[in-house]
Amino acid sequence: MLNADRSRGQTGSLVPSFANAKSEEYPNFDAAMVPMPEQPQTENHSMSGTGGDGAAHVEVSDGVPLWRASLRSLVQSTVWQGTILFLIVANTVTLAMEEPNISADIKSFLMWCDWIFLISFTVEAIVSIVAWGFITKEVGYFRSGWNILDFVVVVIGWATIQSSNGLTALRALRVLRPLRSINKVQGMKVIVEALISSLPMLWNATLLLLFFLFCFSILGLQLWNGTYHRRCYMLAANGTRWALDEAQYDQPCGPRGGLAWECVNDTWCLEPGSDEFAKQNMACHNPVPPHICPYRDDVLNFDNIGYSLLVIFKVLSTDDWPEDMHKSQFATAHISWIFFFTLAILGSFFAVNLLLAVVTSNFANESARIRESAEKKSQRKLIKEKKWAWNLWETRAEPGSQAWHKVRGWAKRIVGHSWYDHILLTVTVLNILVLAADYYNAPEELLQAIFIFNTTCTGIFIVDMVLKLVALGLTYFKDPYNTFDFLLVWLSVIQWFVSKNAVVSAFRALRLFRLVQKFPALRVLAATVVNSLESVAYLSLIMLLFIIICSTLGLQVFGTL
């Protein structure tokens, strides 16, 4: 029987008995908090990998020579990857230092740097090829798209090392090498793979967007074809309608009727001095020859389908689109705003966001797939958390702390009551309203009343913090909102001693965020925003790499023009 018990103890079967024993000793014990013993990890000698692209870990089989296994460990080490990343950043910096009128000394220094970087990257490629093989099953060097890109960049570097035609800027593509170690940065892996998997669906969304652009371009072509060519110009001081310098004003005028003077070719300008007249006393310019008055050779018009597409694209990019709307209003009628508002709302807010919706959908699918692949890791983390909970329970359940438990129970009953939250919510709202009552050159009586009320609210928040610390113990800091309240209370206390410090006083406005804790919907929304910050950071890093590559390439190609 003893042997059977020992056997069961090795597989975790004794855990229920242990939990029952704890339940008898401590009636409030929760068996779910008992940590499950981890299964012993068996050593796996099979070989796995992801195409030699810097996977996080590769287990070596008995068929791999020791020297090759050592090389694989080398190229996967943090020191190796960190060194390559440093060389990539340094190479990008030296490429950015090149300029047309560079001195001879700096040009010589940059040339030597090019040789050093190129040799280093070549050695790295050779070592990786030897370690993984060319096209070895599953782990071959050329089975990874990132490795193929690296190899092409090295070849281009050798082909252009002595060239002065700007092709050496292609070596800046090595700045993408951090994406090789994508398995070590889970967030970037999700984003990059989501972007790649989104390409087929992005094609369909792009076709829909192009159809949208084409329809509005045709509509604009029919409405404003040729209307941007008639312009109004400033009048002389005596009110005579004539054209001054054509560069002074380029506002089109159109057939409006009403309080206007009929000008050449059925265009209209309002009477100077009347209640309603053209901006800055505009009048029509007599075009010579008739019907032709170029609009400063501006291509942003609706004269043909190509120009119309440019205008529609500009509106979708929200780049000063009201200017085009105003031109159309002056050229025809004020009702033209309907076209541009409809285009801006449907295009900028819906059609363009279809592309983002596609990427977001694939991002969610990729995240779910990676979460499934990391299930074992999550289980191990859960076991650690249960161990932590058990240790915390043992800390709470010490014999001889009955008096402390009574105090803690009293505090729990207070902070857990519904009226307690209502009181805190009311105090928080009143505190925010009082803070908003302050203004420049406020009377001393108002400032004194605000100070007294703020001090009272701070005292209430201190009592709230103490009660929750007593009721929850160290688990108080497990909730980020409680941690935020803790810091906010201490900032308020510091303000009592440095009341003249405007920076510290400004932190009182953060009390507005206490309302987030009181409303579940706001908590969910705030949690969503916070959880997205990590993905936004990785996406920003990818965008930064793209900007650096394009900027460096533009410097090399167009810097001498």
Image (cartoon, rainbow, N blue to C red):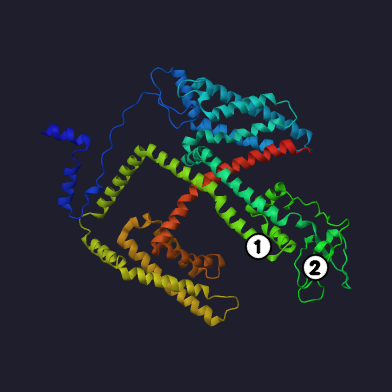
- Identify the residue at horizontal 73%, vertical 62% (top origin): 332
- Identify the residue at horizontal 53%, vertical 82% (top origin): 445
Residue 317 seen in the figure: no
* Residue at the left extreme of this rendering: 1
Q: Nearer the viewer, residue 179 or 5?
A: 179
Residue 432 appears left or right of 374: right
Residue 426, x across and y down, in percent: 40, 72
Query: Which quadrant of the figure contains the N terminus?
Result: top left
Q: Amino acid at mark 2?
A: Cys
First of labels 1, 2 by sequence position: 2
Residue 516, x across and y down, in percent: 43, 62
Residue 102 seen in the figure: yes
Which quadrant would residue 378 be assigned to in this image? top left
Residue 403, x across and y down, in percent: 22, 63
Q: Amino acid at mark 1?
A: Trp
Residues packed near mark 2 inside 10 Å, few (<14), some (14 to 19) or many (20 plus) = many
Q: Tags 1 and 2 in contact by the CB under 8 Å rule?
A: no
CA gap, disc 1 to disc 2? 20 Å
- Give residue 269's mark: 2
- Identify the residue at horizontal 88%, vertical 69% (top origin): 236
Residues packed near mark 1 inside 10 Å, few (<14), some (14 to 19) or many (20 plus) = some
Query: Which quadrant of the figure contains the C terminus?
Result: top right
Q: Secondary structure at mark 2?
A: strand
Q: How many marks?
A: 2
Q: Secondary structure at mark 1?
A: helix
> Where is mark 1, residue-wise?
337
Residue 245 appears left or right of 14: right
Residue 374, x across and y down, in percent: 38, 38
Q: Nearer the viewer, residue 278 or 482?
A: 278
- Give residue 63's mark: none
